[in-house]
Every structure is written in structure tokens, then in C-alpha cells.
Image (cartoon, rainbow, N blue to C red):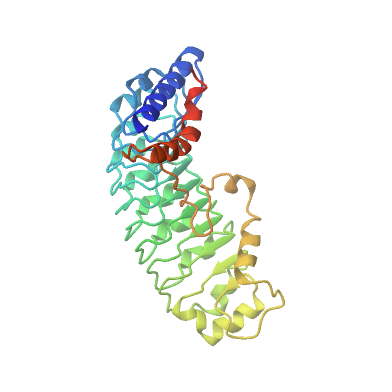
Amino acid sequence: METVCHFFRTNYILANCEDVICKKAFSLNLSHYQMIELPAIIEHCESLMKLFLNQNKLTKVPGSLGNLTRLQVLALDYNHLDEFPACICELVRLKFLNVSCNEIHCLPAELGHLTALETFWCNNTGLRRLPPEIGNCERLQTLGVRGNRLQSLPDSIGQLAELRWLTAENNRLGEVPQTFGCLQHLIHLNLKGNQLRRLPAMLMSMPNLKFVFLNVNRIDQMPSEAELEMLHFLRMLNLTQNPISIQPELQQLAQTQSHIYVERLLEEPSDSRPMMQRLQQEHAELEPEANANLEPESSSDWANSARTSQLDSSDESTLENTIEDLSVMLPEMSRFITTF
């Protein structure tokens, strides 16, 4: 049955590619097709502006993908890539790129060629460093590098003057570069789950910031009350699960400044909703443009949207197993049969 399903799946994919070529279509969605390689015909889909290849089993991307010079959106998340495809750096019109949830440990310097890039997700890839050339992507508005092995961020990140949304949670960052203060359009900053020891002083010179997550770090250097008051423009400063969060001074200050979140060791604030509910409500008030860049969201991590249903590849040949196999296969095959 797997052979039959593979036949229909392959022909359905080819039919979609041929349809794009015939109609000069702008968009092609080949996600969730268990592809281990891209069909050669895809290099002839030159009209494409959006290509979705996420949630497959791709181990490499052919260099011919670089021929799709009109591409503006490319989704490659949840595949089996073990390196960043070099041909992507030829797609100089690219605005949205997602390579999350692969095994991409480094990014090439040529990433800086993507000067039109506005959104870049590289979450949960084992990434060890961001190349300094990322500073050339000066139109970047959204950058996601959560769940990696980053120990530092390049100074050139300060060149991303249009950046509005930066999430680098669950890395190994011990500090942020001084050039952070140049990110004057930044609204959302998530540095949760790193190794920061102090509150970054440059935050006070970034008046457009609304949401700052510094929880689950190692911050043990208590900022002064004056410094915290200078962050009055924030809607949320999350300092929970840091050594300073249980300090009496910060506990008292959190009672009078509602935007500061720490563990509740004193009496409950007037807003008695659970902390998580309040955070979600306030986070939902982000500007629509920022929310539009969110990845698929689950209860704990925007990047956790991996497909869980898999085709049954059993080789058993009894009638009972055949009937069971059909019940699994038919819903999947129905996606492809309508083409013929």
C-alpha cells in the first residue's frame, strides 16, 4: 500500500508543478508530502513567488532552486537538512525564510546577500553562531533563533534598524552587545532561558520596547529603582526565575509597577488573574504587524507544530491488516486522486 500511496503522491506533486508552469502561478504548497528530494521539474516553476516545502523529509535542496529568482517566501522548516542550502543565498528577492527544526549548525556569510529579507526563522537547529553579515539584512523586522547554542550575538545586529521582533530564548547568551541600543524600532525582545547576569542597560534607551522577557536567566545584579523606573514605557518586564526576583526590593517595586513580573512572595496585586493569563492578554495587544509574523503556536513554543500522523508502512499481508492499512491510507490518498 505504501508503494501505491507513493505513486499517487509523486504524481500529484508533479501535476501541481506542471500546473504552476502552465498557469505561471505565483504560489506552490508542497508541505506534508514526505518528500525526500525535490522533483527536478521544480526548477522550471520560474513564476513562483511563494514556495512551501515544510514538514517533509528533505535532506538537501538542489542548487537549481536558486533559479527561482522571483521567490519572496520560502518555508523549509521541519525537514532533515544538515546544512544551510547555499542556493538560498541567490534568492535576493526573498522576504520570508523559515529553516527552523533542521540540523543547521552554522549559517554562511552569504546570508548577507538577502538584503530584502524581512522575516527569518532559524529556531531549534543547533545553531552555534550568527554570522556578522546578518547586519547586511537591513530590512529585517522579525528574527527568531530560539532553542539553539548561541553564546553571543554579533555586534552587527545593531545594524538591523528595522527590527521589531527578536526572540533568542533558550540559548547560552551571557550578555548582549552594546549595539542593541541601536534597535530603536524593537517592540518584542525575548531572551528567556539564557545566562544573563544583569539587566541590559541599553534597554533604557529603546523607548519602543513593549515586551521584554528576561525570565529564567541568572540575573543577580540588582538594578537600581531609578533604572527600573526608566523602563516605565514597557508593558511587560518579566524577571521571574532569576536570583533577583525574590529580593524584597524588587518584590516591593513589582507591587507598585504593574509592568514588572516576579514571583509572588508578597500579597496578590489587585489584578488577581493568574500571571500566565495576564501575560497572554497583554501579549495579544501587540501591533497586528508583529502578530502576523508569529510562527504556528502551541502551548509552550511557537515552533512546535510538527506533524504527528504518519502513514502505516506495515508489510503484513493478512486481510485484517490490509483493511486496517486501507483505513489509514485512503484519507491520505484522497489528497492526490482528485488530480486524475
Q: Residue furthest right?
A: 270
Q: Quadrant where the N terminus lies?
A: top left
Q: Is residue 247 above or below residue 179?
A: below
* Image label count: 0
Q: Residue at x 49, y 47 (%)?
A: 142
- Asked if residue 80 can be seen in this view, the reply is yes
Residue at x 58%, y 81% (from the top left corner): 264
| Residue 22 in the image, given as x and y percentages of width and height | 48, 12
Give the residue at the far front of this rendering. 319
Picture quarter containing residue 87?
top left
Q: Quick one: 92 or 324, which is closer to the camera? A: 324
Say which residue appears at 42% left-offset and 71% top-offset. 217
Along the line of sight, the residue nearer the viewer: 22 or 95: 22
Residue 49 visible somewhere in the drawing: no
Task: Provide residue 213's location: percent of width, then percent of height.
Answer: 51, 64
Residue 117, image x, y percentages: 45, 37
Residue 57: image quadrant is top left
194 left or right of 131?
right
Q: What residue appears at the point 60 percent right and 67 percent down from the top-left corner?
A: 276
The percent position of residue 321, horizontal first and vertical second, equals: 39, 40
